[in-house]
Image (cartoon, rainbow, N blue to C red):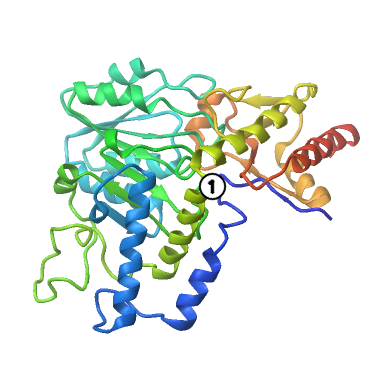
Amino acid sequence: MKKVYVDNSSTSFPKAPGVSNAMKDFLDNACCNINRGGYKASYDAALKIIESRKLLCEIFNFNNPKNVIFTPGITYSLNMILKGFLKDGEHVITTSMEHNGVMRVLHDLSQNKINYDIAKCGIDGSIDVNSISKLINSKTKAVVMTHASNVCGTILSIHEVVDICAKNNLKLIVDSAQTAGILDVDMSYIDALAFTCHKGLLASQGLGGFIVKSDMAEEIRPIMTGGTGSLSHEIFQPDFLPDKFEFGTLNIPAILGLKKSIEYIKSIGIKNIFERELELTKLFLSKLESLDAVKIIGKENTDGRLAVISLDFAGKDNAEIAASLDENYGIMTRCGLHCAPNAHKTLGTYPHGTIRFSFGHLNTADEVEYIVHSIKDILKRGV
């Protein structure tokens, strides 16, 4: 049976060339720690970690590698930023398109005298920045928002939110889970950017991080502490970056894999990756127009969106269709609420959810045609 992977919003596949080899080579030949060993292999690994930070700075338009913090993942990063930055009595604004990686953190904080409000997005997932302005009060400290929806692919207007934050002395915290490596993300107008490495950055699971401007870093308390290999004679956590927020042993194999994936992305060009994915999206959307039983959720064209398409099958069980696509046609999608119930409420697909098709730049037009043919076949014969 033919196999087609279209679940890149969850995690990209295949990974960039060289990622697995770099990880394996380190594990097989130089599996040492950094900032601990006083020998060449340790120093060489540390240098490659620095190079990885520099590469991240290059793709996010930032100029200070020490402010690149590695964590086990983007959810971990968002916890560190929000729980370390916000204090009792303060207020933060988010949007109704957020993933639970933001919403559950804010809910947890709300149990401890930190308040939040949700700016309502449109039925297509877009944000009206006036809805954010109306929620600002004297206690508001920050806006935290996704760069693009993991449910329907709608890109949110960060540039407009930047102006609001500047006028009201608010910090802007961005969740780039769906856009890092796919869209140009510019740290020059963002105060803290959380990223993951296993989606658009084409590296392995188990690695993420955040980039934070120095003035904001000073205001963030480390919510976890431990050994760093620096200031080992002191009982307190170092206050310089990245050690302030990096403790214990880093996921060195994954970081070395990330180095290879970013080199690959740079060789192709982020713009070219995005354009290729949009070509596939345009083809997919055009082929769906003739299917009355299929409703496209969110934006129905390629303007202001990623290659993330959610479909709702009228009068049918989306889960059964998704299962049939996998079992009978080898097409791997994701069905349900996608860890973003508020987004589905905004889009009108709660509680039943949708089937999400998320393309990567290595998918092909033939695969798109095959997916559409398979959907037609299911609708014709029934699940």
Q: Residue at 42%, 59% (x, y): give it.
A: 207
Q: Residue at 46%, 31% (x, y): give it.
A: 97
Residue 203 percent across, percent down from the top left = 50, 57
Residue 167 percent across, percent down from the top left = 20, 21
Q: Residue at 70%, 27% (x, y): give it.
A: 285
Residue 62 percent across, percent down from the top left = 29, 44
Q: Which secondary structure, mark 1?
A: helix
Camera-side residue of 364 and 284 = 364
Mark 1 closeness class: few <14, some 14–19, many ≥20 residues within 10 Å? few
169 over 210 or under it: above or below? above
Residue 101 visible: yes
Residue 308 visible: no
Q: Which residue, as the protein is rendered here, is positioned at the far left?
A: 234
Quadrant into which the N terminus falls: bottom right
Q: Which residue, as the protein is rendered here, is positioned at the far right?
A: 381
Camera-side residue of 306 and 63 = 63
Q: In the figure, is residue 235 to the left or right of 8?
A: left
Q: In the figure, is residue 150 to the left or right of 105?
A: right
150 over 328 or under it: above or below? above
Q: Residue beneath label 1, please?
A: 268
Callout count? 1
Q: Amino acid at mark 1?
A: Ile
Residue 7 percent across, percent down from the top left = 63, 47
Q: In the figure, is residue 168 to the left or right of 263?
A: left
Q: Residue at 35%, 47% (x, y): give it.
A: 58
96 over 83 or under it: above or below? above
- Quadrant hosting residue 309: top right
Quadrant into which the C terminus falls: top right
12 over 348 or under it: above or below? below
